[in-house]
Amino acid sequence: MSSVDIPREQWATRIGFIFAAVGSAVGLGNIWRFPFQVGQEGGAGFLLIYLLFIVVIGFPAMLVEFVVGRYTERNPVGALKQVGSGIWEYVGWIFIATGFVILSYYSVVAGWTIRYTILGLQDGYIADAAEAEAQFVSLASGLEAILLHAVFMAAVIAIVAVGIERGIELAVKVMVPAIILITIGLAIYAATLEGAGEAYSYYLSPEWGTIAANWQSIVPAAAGQAFFTLSLGMGVMITYASYLGENRNLAEDGAIIIGFDTAIAFITGLIVFPILFTAGVDPADPGAGAIFVSLAAAFGDLTLGWLIGAVFFGTVAIAALSSAISLMEVVVSYIIDERGVSRPTAAVGIGGGMFLLGIPSAYDLVLLDLFDLFADQILLVLGGLLLMILVGWSLSELAVEELQRGIGDLGSLASAWIWAVRIPVILVLLVALTLGILDYYEFLTGPFAEWIGEQ
Ligand code: TRP
């Protein structure tokens, strides 16, 4: 039933693989989720812990996904079937389910970014915060949101249907440099704003007192963000590394990818906080919609804010597209490998299903939270945790051997890597999972129960 005799696609160039992985990593997570997490967790302290986790947790975990993908040359379900027998197959299934759920609502949020790009070009943004909020609420859910969700999903389907080399690789080679140039340009612009000085000290000088007082919420938030922003925990990097033919230095590739992703998130902070401080908006305003509302209101306040805003939201939309491609590719690669379906058919079928699953999220914000929290705090962390346990504790020899292919003998660095996976990575994921489940329970019994009551 598997169709391994169809020659497997490969990246045409090393840079193509790196761009695709960077394109996956850089997305709504960097430009939308990161600044609102920094705001919610009190500024520079969060940034510091986040950077620490990127190195200590994110880097080792990314290498785990890379070695599994390159070694097996399979989709995540096939890969786990091959390296771990029995129940491990189901871990691959968790990955597929996570990708399915995440993309369903990720596409809705991406639809908002398209709407906000058009909004700037058409009418400009509203400076009054209360009105901006009302506008967000009316745009975020309903028929128009569903329509834009459909538009975005269609774009993802089109690129994935074309394939690895001519579809994904070509698309990211254009999108990634554009994202980098535009964010740098916007950061330079933001530096000229009046509120820049105040914003930099909020964002860049950590206060030990704040970290000590809030570490219980900073630690899981920073760990979750590190995983999400690097596209870890659901087999994206397994899938992308499975299209690597030759033996290259995976540690070096990983470091480059992580460097880009971290740089874009960091630079986004240099854009968002000066804009917010200049407009007098409190960066601590919580919630997923906050960054849309507060940024739009801030753009409404600035000279040429409509244009800067349209460029900003347009960039976010492009970044979301290159990430969404990777989410769909995980599921599509599974269908192609294991079911022998053709790529275009798989892309249309899967994309159609994801579109349908996303309709509730485009219908009401509470339902979007229902999906987002479940995928983000439970599925993603659970899948990542199980993979780390498998590779760290029972496949470590094979993993080290695979990592060294293309690098050479790593000596004690190899055991440093494995032990990083075995203890800190697993521990942090366990804590994050526990807190995530508690949080989800609170959501189900709180806002969600209330919502059900209102229906
Ligand atoms: N990393 C992307 C972002 O920051 C989102 C993303 C793409 C993702 N693929 C993923 C997150 C896989 C988790 C798992 O927006």
Image: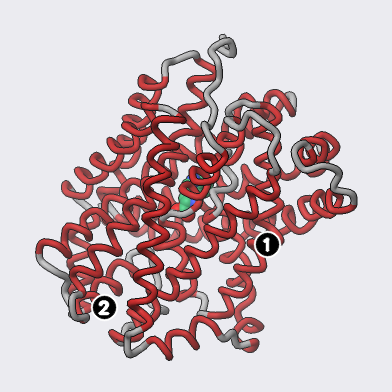
Disc 2, SS: helix
Q: Determine the image quadrant of residue 377.
A: bottom right
Image coordinates for residue 423, horizontal then vertical, percent: 80, 55
Q: Residues within 10 Å of mark 1 (few under 14, many from 20)?
A: some
Q: Determine the image quadrant of residue 179.
A: bottom left
Res 424 seen here: yes
What's under tag 1, amino acid-wise? Answer: Val
Q: Residues within 10 Å of mark 2 (few under 14, many from 20)?
A: many
The label shown at residue 55 is 1
Judge left or right: residue 154 versus residue 388.
left
Judge left or right: residue 249 versus residue 377.
right
Of residues 375 and 248, the one nearer the viewer is: 248
- Residue under the point 80% across and 40% down: 404
Disc 1, SS: helix
> Between marks 2 and 1, how big is the CA–CA gap?
33 Å
Which residue was labeled with disc 2?
298
- Residue under the point 59% across and 13% down: 4
